[in-house]
Image (cartoon, rainbow, N blue to C red):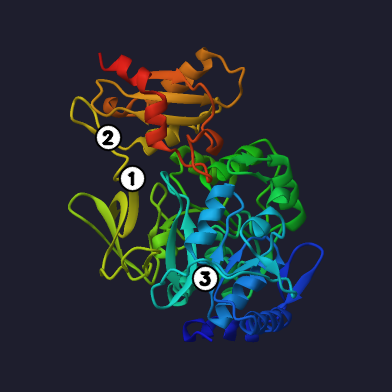
Amino acid sequence: MLPAAEPLWRCLAQHQGIALSDGRRSLSYAQLAEQVSKRAGLLQRHKVQRAALALDNSLDWVIWDLALLQAGLVCVPLPGFFSASQQAHVLQDAGVDCLLGNEGALSQTHGFQPHGDGLLLRTPAQRPRLPAGTAKITYTSGTTGQPKGVCLSAQTQLAVADSLHQASRSCQVQRHLCVLPLATLLENIAGIYAPLLAGACIELRPVAQIGLQGASGFDLPRFIETLHAVRPHSLILLPQLLLALVSAAEQGLTHAAELRFIAVGGGRVAPQVLRRAEQLGLPVFEGYGLSECASVVCLNSPGARRPGSVGRPLAHVELRIAEDGEVLVRGAQMLGYLGEPEHHGEWLGTGDLGQLHEGFLTLYGRKKHQFITAYGRNVNPEWVEAELIQQPSIAQAWLYGEALPGNLAVLVPRQPGCSDTALAEAVARVNADLPDYARVHHWIRASQPFHVDNGLATANGRLRRSALLKHYQSAIQALSH
């Protein structure tokens, strides 16, 4: 048993009441602890070393994850939103010898054989060396190439969870609904470990029942139906899901009476969405994090909130800003990327640009995404893109202006029948609140939505900027002449 995980096991032993529920079945804290110990022993008897979790959101996902932690084995969450080739890459890259779940094509294709007790086992072709202390390998989908494995210790993961528990303690969250896939590190840490430390009940439903459809689809009526059925106290949402919730609340389709803490992260949130949420009484708290720091680094909280910022650093970390504006983090870092040299630096460069104001961090975009216009002005495109997709008529937007006299936006309408006039009016509204150098000076209608199938977006919806640049090269060249 890993010493770093002992505080979690003590909590499981001390808490009473329901720990996990899926609407049909539930486990008390005592029953959860019993199930975790039983499965940890099972994994050890089969001499498992590295297990891939290929399950939908469920009680089993949580039990297996905790069992691997208790047994001191390596957990490799396998996202269902990854493509078949990405999943194959993860299984090979991590040297997985046990597959939990998915008895279909994935197990058969990659040589896993059933050995009873719900385990699918194999002898991997290779077992890459891991940094000492690796308890979890979480794969980032990235924007180019295959996913990269981030190696994390149990100590780092649970330090984040404890800080989140402390930051939200005043909200007295007793029931958390997992909205994001548990293979997403943010939901794994903040939606499982933190609520368990708090003694809360974690509500688990299949992602399709929640309303998530693939990498970027979302069924709002299903989501609202689940909210009404579960009546959670807390949620973790991505910006686009928050926008959907705010829009539904404005139409009277849902209410916020039970909600006490809505954390939002994973991308820039348009200030207008936050203002709309506040007017509705939705308790939204924006945060910021990255896989390399075991998810959350900063978070607004009831006692320390500044709209427009991503909050103050959590208790276990320190921040500083480099001379070039990059955000640096100390106190919670990955052990390294799988297959690359271990990380030993005191400070970790995040690749994000930001400023600190009275301890609150404000972000301005990714360092590598920043472009310089023909007039020498630096522009972070995520800022403008977030404002564009806030408009009701625009579903997706990509902005480019490197060495151009005017910035070009490629727009995906929310509805196929949306007119050019409606798009032009939406752009004009956004431009009215932007400085001239950041405005959309030219725009075109996208030839197709940006998604993983055409290579223009990642599996979790992030833009593949190099692919978009290549795809729309002719339009860009026309502006440079």
Q: Residue furthest right?
A: 24
Secondary structure of residue under mark 3: helix
Tell me where residue 330 appears, x and y as whole percent.
Answer: 30, 68
* SS of the residue under disc 2: strand
Return the residue at label 1.
Answer: 366
Residue 245, by quadrant, is: top right
Disc 2 marks which amino acid? Phe
Residue at mark 2:
371
Q: SS of the residue at dot 1?
A: strand
Q: Write down the residue under mark 3.
A: 165
Above-or-below relation of 131 to 416: below
Crowdedness near tag 1: few (<14), some (14–19) or many (≥20) residues, C-alpha within 10 Å: some
Residue at image location 56% in from the left, 45% down from the top: 242
Residue 207 relative to residue 68: left or right:
right
Q: In which image quadrant can residue 479 be found?
A: top left
Q: CA distance from mark 3 to mark 2?
A: 38 Å
Return the residue nearer the eye: 378 or 41: 41
Task: Specify the amino acid type for callout 1.
Answer: Arg
Quadrant of the drawing holding the C terminus: top left
Q: Judge whether residue 71 can be spotted in this image.
A: yes
Alpha carbon of mark 1 to alpha carbon of mark 2: how far? 10 Å
Disc sitting over residue 72 in the figure: none
Residue 32, image x and y in percent? 70, 78
In the depicted structure, whether residue 133 falls above or below residue 105: below
Residue type highlighted by circle 3? His
**x 44%, y 41%: residue:** 271
* Disc 3 residue crowd, few under 14, some 14–19, many 20+, Cα 10 Å: many
Are the residues flagged by discs 1 and 2 in contact, CB closer than 8 Å?
Answer: no
- Can you give x and y, in whole percent of width and height, for residue 372 in the image? 23, 32
